[in-house]
């Protein structure tokens, strides 16, 4: 997945600076009228529904660029195994046992991967729109950063449309 999403994902702060510097200096696209915009999805890892994660995983697995690269597992098998893990994710607190009915523990790499896949799918229309405008865009986990040269109300409209596409348990803040 990391290779698949590299063009729209920041690995860390250094990667962000390097990509932004390339955009500003090498490409010379930072203009005096350029706005900087950000968004953050709150509590993504703990509030997103399992159905939203599984739907995004399914869309990812049937992508022609990914299809057939599952190390002898079918897409259906990966979906079912992932659903089993999500349904059977328990934890103990104060002597009682609980089950995650949405999201999952932050220390489970599968949850992080599923959230990245979900975010990659969710951001697709934004990333496409940004790329068509030769703007800068990237995301680190549940937060995104972009440049915008158009009217600010168009950007807010785009953010509002994206927020409507979020899982119903999730909230987004834009700056």
Image (cartoon, rainbow, N blue to C red):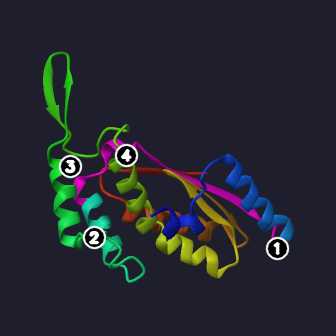
Tell me how far mark 2 sits from mark 1, CA to CA: 36 Å
Left or right: 83 as drawn, with respect to 59: left
Span colored in magenta: 28-51
Pointers 4 and 1 in contact (CB under 8 A)? no
Q: Eyeballing the image, is 62 above or below 45? A: below
Residue holding disc 2:
58
Residue holding disc 3:
86
**Residue 90 location, x and y as percent?**
18, 35
**Residue 59 location, x and y as percent?**
32, 73
x 57%, y 60%: residue: 9
Q: Badge 3: how crowded within 10 Å, few (<14), some, or many (20+)?
A: many
Q: Badge 2: how crowded within 10 Å, few (<14), some, or many (20+)?
A: some
User: Dot 3: what SS?
Assistant: helix
Sequence-first disc among 2 and 1: 1
Q: Which is in the foreground here, disc 2 or disc 4? A: 4
Pointers 2 and 4 in contact (CB under 8 A)? no
Sequence-first disc among 3 and 2: 2
Tell me how far mark 3 sits from mark 1, CA to CA: 44 Å
Sequence-first disc among 3 and 1: 1
Tell me how far mark 2 sits from mark 4, CA to CA: 18 Å
Sequence-first disc among 4 and 1: 1
Tell me how far mark 4 sits from mark 1, CA to CA: 36 Å
Residue 109, disc: 4
Pointers 3 and 1 in contact (CB under 8 A)? no
């Amino acid at each position: 997945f990391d290779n698949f999403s590299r063009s729209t994902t920041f690995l860390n702060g250094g990667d962000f600076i390097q990509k932004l510097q390339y955009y500003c200096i090498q490409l010379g696209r930072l203009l005096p009228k350029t706005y900087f915009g950000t968004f953050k999805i709150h509590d993504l890892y703990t509030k997103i529904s399992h159905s939203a994660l599984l739907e995004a995983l399914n869309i990812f697995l049937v992508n022609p660029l990914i299809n057939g690269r599952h190390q002898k597992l079918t897409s259906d098998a990966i979906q079912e195994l992932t659903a089993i893990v999500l349904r059977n994710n328990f934890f103990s607190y104060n002597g009682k046992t609980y089950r995650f009915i949405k999201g999952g523990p932050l220390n489970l790499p599968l949850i992080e991967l599923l959230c990245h896949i979900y975010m990659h799918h969710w951001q697709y229309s934004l990333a496409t729109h940004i790329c068509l405008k030769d703007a800068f865009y990237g995301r680190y986990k549940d937060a995104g950063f972009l440049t915008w040269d158009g009217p600010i109300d168009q950007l807010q409209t785009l953010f509002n449309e994206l927020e409507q596409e979020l899982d119903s348990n999730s909230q987004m803040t834009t700056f």
